[in-house]
Image: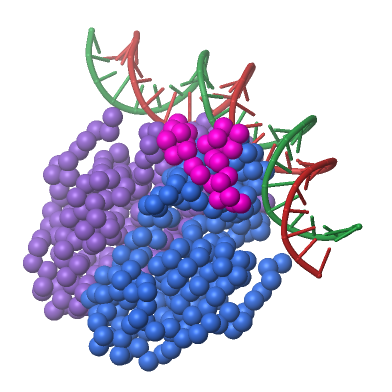
Chain colours: A purple, B blue, C green, D red
Amino acid sequence: MTKSVTLRDAWSGEANCLNCSLRTSVLFAGLQERDFERIHDPIDQFTLKPGNNLYHAGDRGDYMFTVRTGVLKLVQYLPDGGQRIVRIARPTDVLGLEAILDDAYHHDAVALQQTEVCRFPARLVRDLGAETPELHRELMSRWQRALNEADAWLTELSTGSARQRVARLLLRLVRDRETSECHLFSREDMGAMLGVTTETTSRTIAEFKRQSLLVETSPNLFLLDIPNLRRIAED
Amino acid sequence: MTKSVTLRDAWSGEANCLNCSLRTSVLFAGLQERDFERIHDPIDQFTLKPGNNLYHAGDRGDYMFTVRTGVLKLVQYLPDGGQRIVRIARPTDVLGLEAILDDAYHHDAVALQQTEVCRFPARLVRDLGAETPELHRELMSRWQRALNEADAWLTELSTGSARQRVARLLLRLVRDRETSECHLFSREDMGAMLGVTTETTSRTIAEFKRQSLLVETSPNLFLLDIPNLRRIAED
DNA sequence: CGCGCAGTTGAAGTTATTCAACTCGTGTGG
DNA sequence: CCACACGAGTTGAATAACTTCAACTGCGCG
């Protein structure tokens, strides 16, 4: 089924948080140097190839992750084997918040592109968070962000016709972005995000292309007609 | 549209947290007596009738709430005016977590039955939470619970055929309950939870009744045939 | 009594799914 | 280097599922 690459194979070095290029937008953003001194466990970096699993639902959650580059999908499975993508994670996002509470992971986390992540022990955050107000606040803010995303996926991506859902997904992909161009996920993944079949997704995308709402400027890079897509999304 | 009852009309007294009957399962469960001494702002109780709004999306979130009895729906609206129920709050659940982060409320919270809530200032939790590890942990746990619910609504209640969704909703209503009986929400609300129309919901419920998967033992109290509903839910 | 609302049901129309076929690009092995 | 297999995407046709609109029921309440 999934080619199971252990994280061992994906190791790509130890991180130096103090000099991290993402330092200002990352979970540990508020920490002072003296806080960093308390981090004794090494923070490792990993590089995942498309399709690689970062973790599986049910695995012991000993670690949390920060996404440095790339995209991952968070997948949940239904009793009948069907799958549903409940969220995607992008650079600066934190994965595995549930590990702070000593929970097993609740999703499969799968890279959709070449993806780099930093891994740190959940224990670290648990201990530091109880005493460091900056981290405490940052954690709450992360949870709230995940919750906002979850709610938005329900109202925007799982409501209305397939046309509307696809349009809303496309708009979501270019939100707070400089250009209105974006890469598309596989039709299968888009279907799993929207709760429709691969074929329906394909037909809808094809229709959007014919109507020039979507123009392929280079391989798998699409320029969006935002005003008209917005019209469809809001109908 | 909605009969707008201000919370002023619903006031029903001041709370005494130390003697609260929900004390052990509530947000402040971990607090010691000395912590309670720091709570100077009064904690008020309110009683809502079905259809009353506890708060509106966009309102300044100065307060958080604990549900004592009853049920509320959390509703989000689509650009086209359609509505979607993204979660339900039951006794011991906390509403308005986003207020800790100084956010406006993200949903409309509407009572589905006669409902009692306690109201406390978000500031209180913000200040206390930064210093009280028990509360800190409890808060994270509440956020995670909300997130679990959100994910479950996506995978269970917004995926598959209408039959499956209705069956899963029914099963959800009796989970961790002593009896397998439950009250049903209005068809309109159930539809808004499942992302299907009122009519489809009604037809499906009617079909379940005909097949005795659902037996009305008293007005709007239904006994569920759990094994067979589970079969449908998992298909 | 009669109005209004929630629920139900019917019939028609629309939309999405299903299953199958076919294309195209990539990569592998002969 | 070519042949071929494979997977992702696309498309068609038939079917199934859901929506829409409209009518009708039953019940509670002024």
Tell me: A168 left or right of A132. Answer: right
Residue A156 % position (x, y): 54, 53
Residue A231 versus residue D6 in the image, above or below:
below
Q: Residue at x 64, y 55 (%)?
A: B82
Q: Residue at x 56, y 68 (%)?
A: B114
Give the residues in magenta.
B208-235
The residue closer to the viewer here, B180 or D23, is: B180
Verify whether residue A140 appears in magenta: no
Q: Is residue A190 visible?
A: no
Q: Residue at x 19, y 61 (%)?
A: A122
Q: Is residue A130 visible?
A: yes
Residue A144 versus residue A85 in the image, above or below:
below
Residue B185 % position (x, y): 58, 54
The residue closer to the viewer here, B48 or A186, is: B48
Please identify the residue farthest to the front as the structure is shown.
B218
| Location of the C terminus of chain B (image quadrant) | top left
Q: Residue at x 57, y 64 (%)?
A: B113
Please identify the residue farthest to the left as the structure is shown.
A40
Tell me: B87 left or right of B2. Answer: left
Residue B35 versus residue B100 in the image, above or below:
below
The residue closer to the viewer here, A156 or A16, is: A156
